[in-house]
Image (spheres, rainbow, N blue to C red):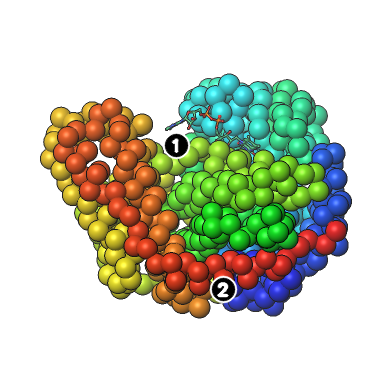
Amino acid sequence: MILLNPNSYAPKDLDATSADLMRKTIAFFEAKGKTRLKKDDRERVWYADFLEFVASEKIFAKLLTPAAYGKGEDGYRWDTFRNCHFSEITAFYALHYWYTWQVTILGLGPIWMGTNEGAKTRTAELLREGGIFAFGLSERAHGADLYSTEMALSPKGDGTWSANGSKYYIGNANEAALVSTFAKTTDGGEFVFFAAQPKKAGYELVQNVVNVQSYVAEYRLHDVTITEADILSKGQDAWDSALNTVNVGKFNLGWASIGICTHAFYEAIHHAEHRVLYGKSVTHFPHVRQLLVDAYCRLVAMKAFARRAADYMRAASPEDRRYLLYNPLVKMKVTTQGEQVIDLLWDVIAAKGFEKDTYFEIATRDIRALPKLEGTVHVNMALVVKFMRNYFFNPGTFPEVPCVTEARDDTFLFHQGPTKGLGKIQFHDHQLAYAKVNLPTVSVFKEQIEVLKEFLIASAGDVETAAVQGKDIDFLLSLGEVFTLVAYGQLLLEYRELHPEDVSDDLLEQIFDFMVRDCSKFALQLFSKPSSTPKQMELCQKMIRKPPVDTARFDRIWNEHVHALRDAYEMRP
Ligand SMILES: Cc1cc2nc3c(=O)[nH]c(=O)nc-3n(C[C@H](O)[C@H](O)[C@H](O)COP(=O)(O)OP(=O)(O)OC[C@H]3O[C@@H](n4cnc5c(N)ncnc54)[C@H](O)[C@@H]3O)c2cc1C
């Protein structure tokens, strides 16, 4: 089965050392138990026990030290494939544990991407000592608008600088060994990344701005002396490493959603099965079956898509930047699908989802965070639509990307280079994946794609409207939703070709059942936009389709995939 189940954890394609780390992590949480997990959540206890475990097993050190700084020791590398496993597992137990790992990844980004060799060597040591890291980008007044950065570095005239200013929403900044801090110089207005040290004089930890177990800090620097040894990058390199770090980090948000939804799914179906109303299990209601089948299919699709996107992250190079489309989709599409999964499940378990002893209660809170962190859905969608023209009308030729699970360092992620030129990036022809599948529901979806292309061609032909709509982010966001579905479906099909054992014909069809419905929904939204033209409205109506009905298939999915999980997993008390 494609979904994580701690009771039968047997990761395909993970080497023995890595699989052992994952198993130990599962064992740590299962030994901690649900009662303690929930108590710590409720009482907002700093997760020192988890960090002690991570330090003693050298987990962050092994998973987050590029091989070049790992002294040749076994298991030290930055390997996106296994990092996906760790993200999924930690979020499966609670988002806080994932978050401290996630912001450590972000904090390490500017260090590993920079040219300060001394800082890299020191960082590798700090990781071995169990250090965590932080990423100081956002500021209170203007969030992640980097141009408006107010954290200032002023030259002192002796080759050093004085740092002044504050940062807001910075995870781990209470305990981090180093805080990668984004600033501007006061003399030239140049961007710069430097490493701040919470233990040094002048570093004021102002407050935790959130009301949960994680520490999401406001910190302030008062005349902190910064030397060349603390500078990670300057100018264009600093700017690029800010954006390229977010590229690496935001991928994990999708994996956190997958972990949360998987645990919530087990809890929900278990509860529904064992709750008896009017003498029958709740799972006898046809609408409950529909909700659970939809939740399951959306969850499987989230994971299959994110797995395939990881292949493109790992295959990326200066010549192959396709990951820059698939990665924001993992951030934006997978995480918003996660919200839908929780909504569907919550409609099934209703009051139970509020109870203090359920995982579900924290899932309902935490699932909302992921679409909003590291750039909102809007920001990512605005990015994604830049790729639409080349995606549909100017495909490139690339060697086939296999399933990339080998134990190797993903060094390109730290050498992504300039962040510009997005409109020039090409993709392989999406039709290659779609042409290989002729199942009835997938075929309806393919017809919807053809209408979308007709829509885009007709829209581009109307030059005046195109100029107006091109600047209308509200319109573009809805158009982007339809486009996103096409790329989502493409990678799902590619995943299924590589892993037919994970996604049967039946399951694929049931997944495309919601894809067809979602496409219809977004087409209706586009239809209703103030600026849509009569021609566009006509094509939107043509895009609205009903998926073929196949009740026998639905029943098979219910019986063999969904209902079969009713007692598959319960966290130890
Ligand atoms: C729990 C938590 C932890 C966090 N951890 C960190 C951390 O460790 N380090 C760190 O640096 N930051 C961190 N952040 C900050 C986080 O990355 C930002 O909150 C996030 O990027 C959203 O920014 P914002 O809330 O400031 O939204 P704003 O930037 O204020 O956006 C407001 C609105 O404008 C829209 N918008 C903004 N720009 C665009 C655009 N270009 N195109 C279209 N629409 C746009 C947004 O979609 C939104 O609807 C954290 C935040 C939280 C809540």
Disc ID at residue 378: 1
Q: Quadrant of the N terminus?
A: bottom right
Where disc 2 sits, the SS reads helix
Q: Is residue 192 left or right of residue 534?
A: right
Residue 274 vs residue 360, the one in the foreground: 274
Where disc 1 sits, the SS reads helix
* In the depicted structure, whether residue 96 falls above or below residue 205: below
Q: Is mark 1 within 8 Å of ligand 1?
A: yes
**Amino acid type shown at disc 1:** His
**Amino acid type shown at disc 2:** Glu
**Ligand 1 sits in which quadrant?**
top right
Residue drawn 67% across and 40% down? 365
- Give percent across and percent down for residue 190: 50, 30
Residue that numbered label 2 is attached to: 560
Q: Quadrant of the C terminus?
A: bottom right
* In the depicted structure, whether residue 4 falls above or below residue 39: below
